[in-house]
């Protein structure tokens, strides 16, 4: 899209454009005029809608379903804390270890489920996101003794990412790590935290439910590709 072009119903998403080598946009409405804009400009488009919304106009304009996101919220007083020996948090860590963990955990995101996006590009998108969070000081390392077992990504009052090394999964550690990190995040003065979880990620849904998070909202995510990803 050339500078000066009218984008009444679209918002550019440069953090995705750098990964897919095509202009990327988030749609702000499902109005017919907005849908027609997606026909006028090459790019990859994302829109999030209520599951109850009529999807026929989206499908008629080439959009396709990729995911359902569940958005739980936890009030400060409802956070349930768990403790496990040998676990701790740290903001002093080796970034390469965090990126190594990230490389093995993000395989089921909405871009991995988008048949128009090669897995290698979806991987790059999530790795760049984690690197951005590292550079902005929004990653907390989850330590088991002296080993970096995982990481917790956040921004303001939102829990963004949680990743753990394979050898530390299914050991009951996630509840302790995540509850400690949530407690730390709440120290910034927030009354509640929220997150966004794919409906397909049952393990994460169960984890956050155990911590005191409760469902507040659900959205369906649709993508559209007008052009080619190279």
Image: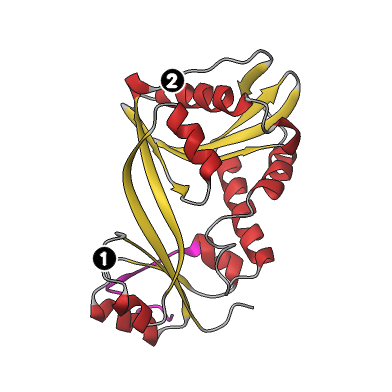
- Magenta segment, principal secondary structure? loop
Kind of element beneath mark 1:
loop
> Quick check: 24 left or right of 73?
right
Which label is found at residue 53?
A: 1
Q: Is residue 21 above or below residue 196?
A: below
Q: Marks 1/2: CA distance?
A: 35 Å
> Quick check: 163 left or right of 33?
right
Q: Which quadrant of the figure has residue 77?
A: top left
| Residue 5 visible within the image | no
> Closer to the camera, 50 or 12?
50
Does 123 lie within the magenta span? Answer: no
Q: Residue at the location (42% across, 83% down)?
A: 41
Tell me the crowding category of disc 1: few under 14, some 14 to 19, or many 20 or more residues within 10 angstroms, Cα based: few
Farthest-out residue, bottom: 40
> Quick check: 230 left or right of 200?
right
Tell me the crowding category of disc 2: few under 14, some 14 to 19, or many 20 or more residues within 10 angstroms, Cα based: some
Q: Residue at the location (49% across, 35% down)?
A: 206
Q: Residue at the location (40% across, 24% down)?
A: 186
Rendered location of residue 123, percent (x, y): 65, 58
Q: Is residue 132 above or below residue 141?
A: below
Q: Residue at the location (71% across, 37% down)?
A: 165
Magenta residues (range)? 1-14
Does 13 lie within the magenta span? Answer: yes
User: Which quadrant does the C terminus fall into?
Assistant: bottom right
Farthest-out residue, top: 85
Which label is found at residue 80?
A: 2
Q: Is residue 6 above or below residue 176?
A: below
């Amino acid at each position: 899209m050339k500078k000066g072009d009218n984008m009444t119903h679209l918002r550019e998403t440069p953090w995705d454009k750098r990964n897919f080598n095509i202009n990327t946009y988030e749609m702000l409405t499902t109005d017919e005029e907005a849908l027609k804009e997606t026909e006028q400009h090459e790019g990859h488009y994302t829109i999030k809608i209520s599951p109850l919304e009529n999807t026929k106009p989206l499908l008629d304009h080439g959009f396709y379903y990729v995911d359902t996101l569940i958005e739980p919220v936890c009030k400060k007083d409802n956070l349930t804390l768990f403790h496990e020996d040998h676990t701790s948090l740290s903001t002093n860590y080796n970034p390469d270890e965090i990126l190594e963990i990230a490389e093995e955990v993000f395989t089921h995101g909405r871009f991995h489920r988008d048949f128009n996006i090669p897995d290698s590009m979806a991987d790059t998108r999530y790795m760049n996101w984690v690197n951005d969070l590292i550079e902005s000081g929004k990653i907390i390392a989850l330590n088991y003794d002296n080993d970096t077992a995982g990481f917790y990504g956040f921004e303001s009052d939102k829990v963004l990412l949680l990743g753990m090394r394979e050898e530390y999964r299914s050991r009951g550690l996630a509840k302790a790590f995540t509850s400690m990190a949530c407690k730390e995040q709440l120290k910034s003065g927030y009354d509640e935290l929220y997150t966004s979880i794919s409906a397909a990620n049952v393990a994460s849904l169960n984890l956050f439910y155990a911590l005191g998070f409760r469902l507040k909202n659900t959205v369906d995510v649709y993508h559209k590709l007008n052009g080619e990803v190279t």
